[in-house]
Image (spheres, grey):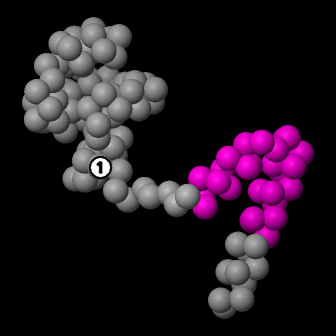
Amino acid sequence: MNNLKKIAKAKNKSLTSLAVELGVSQEAISQYISGKIKPKLSTIIKMAKILNVSTDYLLDLSDDMTNSNFKITENELALIGNYRKLNDKNKYKVEAYIQAMVDFSEDTKK
């Protein structure tokens, strides 16, 4: 998490205030930066939200601070909303149908 210190400084956020917002000790923040311990996934997500950066950037997986590689359309949002309204049985059917469509599509490309 080498980028953590850099982004905190760029956002004028002290590591102490970040620790308070995350509900962890300042020592934990130092250990995240040094690589001695790894934060929980929930902490990484919360940290990314606080600093307004992507989790990939925090984890040194990307030089892109934003989530610009992840765009979702209005249609996709509507599909997700409708999917969430389904019961488990119907969600399974939708998932199976989509997988069958993907498989069929890949087979026709060959």
Q: In the rendered view, does 3 fall on the left or right side of 86?
A: left
Q: Position of residue 15 (x, y in %)?
A: 17, 19
Is residue 2 among the parts visible in the rendering? Answer: no
In magenta, the rendered stretch is 75-100
Q: Is residue 109 magenta?
A: no
Q: Amino acid at mark 1?
A: Thr
- Residue found 26% across the figure and 14% down from its top: 19
| Quarter of the figure that contains the N terminus | top left
- Residue found 68% across the figure and 47% down from its top: 81
Front residue of this view, candidates 63 and 52 = 52
- Residue found 27% across the figure and 10% down from its top: 20
Compared to 51, does 75 lie above or below?
below
Is residue 39 among the parts visible in the rendering? Answer: yes
Q: Position of residue 64 (x, y in %)?
A: 25, 53
Compared to 104, does 65 lie above or below?
above
Q: Residue furthest right?
A: 89
Q: Position of residue 104 (x, y in %)?
A: 76, 79
Q: In the rendered view, does 24 fall on the left or right side of 26?
A: right
Front residue of this view, candidates 12 and 2 = 12
Q: Tell me the quarter of the picture where residue 78 sits.
A: bottom right
Q: In the rendered view, does 104 fall on the left or right side of 59?
A: right
Chief secondary structure of the magenta span? helix
Compared to 103, does 8 lie above or below?
above
Compared to 100, does 42 lie above or below?
above
Q: Is residue 89 magenta?
A: yes
| Quarter of the figure that contains the C terminus | bottom right
- Judge the density around disc 1: few (<14), some (14-19), many (≥20) Cα neighbours within 10 Å: some
State the count of labels. 1
Q: In the rendered view, does 40 fall on the left or right side of 101?
A: left
Q: Secondary structure at mark 1?
A: loop
- Residue found 59% across the figure and 53% down from its top: 77
Which residue is denoted by mark 1 in the rendering? 66
